[in-house]
């Protein structure tokens, strides 16, 4: 849900900001008392709070959302790692970086608190890389070059003989970790492969939300995290850092002067004028349609299978709930109350980070289980309403005719129930399809995640958002047709209407 | 065919059937009559175990139904049941309602089941409704389909649970006509009904149920012409009654009159009758006043809907002589009013006390 809100907020920001009046770019001291966008818990966050004690802070979760907030006038500045800001400014001519830095930061590899052995190994590798000038080369290649198209990633052989090193990252942080040409690229990605080679370990990369990297470390889902991880005192309490592999300025990103009046003289908003350009940069460039296609498939798979699982499980829960035995009835009531009373995102994270903490399980499967369990609670109650809605006389008539209880249910009650509950069931199904948009939290690349990845590269909120809105609608619509068919054939009078008997 | 011994049924603390023992031969048509809430429907539902009996024994065709090893669903196939609320399967057409049981339970082929179903629909006069759905039929048509659905299973017994109670008066006769026809064809039938004419004309025996037992049973002639017991009589003659208790000589006459008025209004009695009743009761209480000092008197007003007779009975304990004997009265005026208003007067005493009963004139 959170993510949906963010998307919506971003959309509103963008549209509202289209015509906002622009002021002259402020100096660093001018920012005191203004609205400053930050990503919670980063070094930029701490530095900005130290530098501007009286400012208002707008807390966001991705760099692209923060840059968008500055662009649309919802914030006056975004304080963050300069190397990332350079990239954002390069993609949007309206933004520029204040020369005077806000502070300094160190970037390091994050590890589990109790994993001192791994720290020693990685520190050793980093010291060697520094000695050989490799770290300086990486910095020159990814940060100081100020490239316009991302430099190519070298290929690494994955023949580690000393096991696997699982690395978590958040690939929405150009130039450290991002999607380019259908694969992960960036300084952090190249660095971890170098470390893997030196340690003779195979690297497996898990793309997660930045917020969930620390929980993933703690629950042993990953061994290390590289995602432009700033070293802060607060985080040191939770995780162990290697020696820093990069240090950099913390700077402020602000709006440049208002654009010339002539630029908008055709009266149409900027994003509307260049739909073709947007289509090209968001979909064609770097084969991004593949990201969308994969995300679409994942969303459909999760929706369909969790509906199937939820319907079957819902049937079992409904049977237990309607049983006369307390031993069955009470657990079913508790299950329904808890599952309906807690956000599905929380359930998803609990299953991924707690229940399956040390088991390496496909996150898509976790998503299907979590949404299936949630759907079961709702469908169980829908089934119960449907079954209780069938007149008791129907059951009595079946039993009096000589049917057993079970065959009465199958032949008499169930056919009447299905037709009755389908309208409500369809509504619940649509909610489920849309709810799946939170699976990005457990490293599943669904449709929403695909659009996030594209947005983080193209800095274009409108086009990807509207596109996935349309795609969600289409998925729901197509899947609903199959339920609609079921609704028609379970209509008792269907045969007659179709010209049957 | 059906043998029931000492059947009882309790719902929680409420005992609905106390002790029922019946024996029904093949081909008998039994009507079960009696006031509401006396367990008629429960008895029927116990016979096919829709309600589980609390005790006793039920034997159908020599098979003990309550034996755990009995295949109850199989036994139910021999016993059709027609419900007050029809209970046709709402998701099936009329024809499918009739064929579901034979196809799924008896293993009849679809074509055979359908042709038999069409014959049965013809029998109940609804051949043209085969493709209709239950919600498109009138109440009477639904009940006839329900009867046909029972017949499709070739039952030996059919239990009818108030089959006409939910019907418009105009539709009752079409259902009763079908039932009459079945009775003539030798099916064993148990019919819980309020249709007295049907019970009288069609049944081989009539059970009158009250107080959780078969209170009285007999041929229709015995039950309808000469009911032996008081509650049966009251039911057959559709007697409505009210009971007033007078505890002391200083009773509240106005309260008594108000109760009489209420009773008269309920039975829609003419104003004149009410005035006669007031006068009669007032005079009777004047006569009874000396007795009231020692013992209470219970006055029962009974109105027979069917005959229009209004009866007054005064009961008190003890075996005192007839208070209307002129010797015991202070004056003749009260007595002359009473005798003028009463068509017949009867006084008797027995072990339980004495009872004076009068029938009001003009009733």
Image: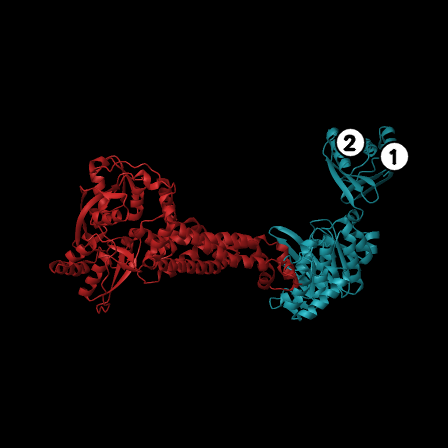
- Judged left or right of residue B359, residue A420 is left
Within 10 Å of the Cα at label 2, are there few (<14), some (14-19), or many (20+) other Cα atoms?
few
Kindly indicate whether the residues beneath marks 2 and 1 are on one polypeptide chain. Answer: yes
Farthest-out residue, left:
A131
Q: CA distance from mark 2 to mark 1?
A: 20 Å
Chain B takes which shade in the image?
A: cyan
The picture places residue A191, in percent across and down from the top left corner, at 20, 59
The answer to whether any part of residue B64 appears in the image is no
Chain A takes which shade in the image?
A: red
What residue is shown with label 1? B339
Q: First in sequence: mark 2 or mark 1?
A: 2
Nearer to me, B314 or A14: A14
Cβ atoms under marks 2 and 1 closer than 8 Å: no
Subunit under mark 1 = B
Nearer to me, B59 or A387: A387
Residue at point 36% right, 46% down? A271
Coloration mode: by chain
Quadrant of the image containing the C terminus of chain B = top right
């Amino acid at each position: 849900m959170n993510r949906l809100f963010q998307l919506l907020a971003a959309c509103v920001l963008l549209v509202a900001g289209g015509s906002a009046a622009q002021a002259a770019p402020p100096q660093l001291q001018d920012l005191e008392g203004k609205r400053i966008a930050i990503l919670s818990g980063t070094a930029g966050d701490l530095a900005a709070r130290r530098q501007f004690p009286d400012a208002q802070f707008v807390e966001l979760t991705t760099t692209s959302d923060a840059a968008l907030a500055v662009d649309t006038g919802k914030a006056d500045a975004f304080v963050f790692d300069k190397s990332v800001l350079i990239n954002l400014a390069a993609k949007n001519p309206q933004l520029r970086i204040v020369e005077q830095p806000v502070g300094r930061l160190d970037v390091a590899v994050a590890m589990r608190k109790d994993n001192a052995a791994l720290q020693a190994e990685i520190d050793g590798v980093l010291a060697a890389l520094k000695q050989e000038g490799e770290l300086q080369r990486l910095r020159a290649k990814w940060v100081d070059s100020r490239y316009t198209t991302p430099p190519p990633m070298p290929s690494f052989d994955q023949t580690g003989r000393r096991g696997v090193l699982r690395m978590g990252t958040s690939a929405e942080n150009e130039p450290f970790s991002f999607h380019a040409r259908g694969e992960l690229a960036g300084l952090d990605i190249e660095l971890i492969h170098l470390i893997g080679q030196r340690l003779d370990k195979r690297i497996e990369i898990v793309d997660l939300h930045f917020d969930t990297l620390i929980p993933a470390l703690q629950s042993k889902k990953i061994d290390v995290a590289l995602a432009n991880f700033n070293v802060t005192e607060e985080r040191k309490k939770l995780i162990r850092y290697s020696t820093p592999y990069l240090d950099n300025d913390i700077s402020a990103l602000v709006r440049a002067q208002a654009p010339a009046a002539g630029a908008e003289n055709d009266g149409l908003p900027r994003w509307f004028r260049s739909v073709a350009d947007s289509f090209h940069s968001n979909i064609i460039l770097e084969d991004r349609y593949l990201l969308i296609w994969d995300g679409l498939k994942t969303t459909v798979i999760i929706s369909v299978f969790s509906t199937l699982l939820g319907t079957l499980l819902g049937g079992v829960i409904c049977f237990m709930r309607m049983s006369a035995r307390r031993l069955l009835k009470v657990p079913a009531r508790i299950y329904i109350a808890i599952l309906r009373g807690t956000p599905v995102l929380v359930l998803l994270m609990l299953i991924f980070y707690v229940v399956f903490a040390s088991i390496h399980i496909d996150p898509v499967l976790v998503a299907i289980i979590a949404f299936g369990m949630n759907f079961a609670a709702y469908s169980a109650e829908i089934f119960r309403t449907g079954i209780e809605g069938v007149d008791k006389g129907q059951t009595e008539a079946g039993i009096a005719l000589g049917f057993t209880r079970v065959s009465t249910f199958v032949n008499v009650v169930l056919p009447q129930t299905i037709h009755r509950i389908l309208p409500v069931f369809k509504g619940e199904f649509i909610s489920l399809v849309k709810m799946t948009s939170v699976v990005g939290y457990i490293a599943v690349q669904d449709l929403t995640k695909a659009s996030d990845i594209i947005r983080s590269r193209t800095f274009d909120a409108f086009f990807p958002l509207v596109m996935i809105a349309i795609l969600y609608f289409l998925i729901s619509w197509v899947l609903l047709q199959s339920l609609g068919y079921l609704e028609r054939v379970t209509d008792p009078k269907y045969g007659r209407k179709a010209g049957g008997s | 065919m059906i043998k029931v011994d000492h059947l009882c049924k309790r719902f929680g603390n409420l005992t609905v059937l106390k002790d029922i023992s019946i024996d029904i031969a093949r081909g008998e048509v039994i009507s079960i009559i009696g006031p509401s809430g006396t367990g008629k429907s429960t008895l029927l539902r116990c016979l096919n175990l829709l309600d589980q009996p609390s005790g006793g024994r039920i034997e159908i065709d020599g098979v003990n139904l309550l034996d755990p090893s009995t295949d109850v669903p199989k036994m139910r196939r021999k016993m059709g049941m027609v419900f007050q609320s029809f209970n046709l399967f709402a998701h099936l057409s009329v024809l499918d309602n009739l064929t579901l049981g034979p196809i799924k339970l008896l293993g009849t082929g679809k074509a055979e089941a359908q042709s038999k179903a069409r014959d049965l629909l013809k029998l109940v006069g609804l051949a043209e409704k085969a493709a209709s759905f239950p919600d498109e039929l009138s109440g009477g048509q639904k009940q006839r389909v329900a009867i046909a659905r029972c017949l499709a299973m070739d039952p030996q017994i059919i239990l009818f649970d108030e089959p006409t109670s939910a019907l418009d008066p105009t539709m009752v006769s079409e259902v009763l006509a079908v039932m009459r026809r079945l009775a003539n064809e030798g099916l064993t039938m148990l019919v819980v009904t309020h249709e007295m004419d049907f019970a009288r004309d069609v049944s081989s025996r009539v059970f009158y149920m009250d107080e959780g037992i078969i209170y009285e049973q007999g041929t229709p002639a015995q039950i309808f012409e000469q009911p032996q017991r008081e509650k049966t009589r009251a039911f057959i003659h559709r007697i409505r009654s009210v009971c007033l208790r007078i505890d002391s000589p200083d009773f509240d006459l106005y309260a008594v009159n108000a109760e009489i008025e209420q009773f008269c209004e309920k039975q829609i009695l003419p104003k004149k009758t009410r005035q006669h009743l007031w006068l009669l009761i007032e005079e009777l209480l004047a006569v009874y006043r000396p007795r009231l000092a020692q013992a209470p008197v219970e006055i029962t007003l009974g109105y027979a809907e069917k005959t229009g007779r209004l009866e007054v009975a005064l009961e008190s304990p003890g075996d005192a002589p007839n208070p209307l004997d002129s010797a015991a009265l202070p004056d003749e005026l009260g007595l002359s009013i009473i005798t003028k208003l009463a068509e017949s007067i009867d006084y008797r005493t027995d072990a339980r006390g004495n009872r004076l009963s009068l029938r009001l004139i003009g009733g």
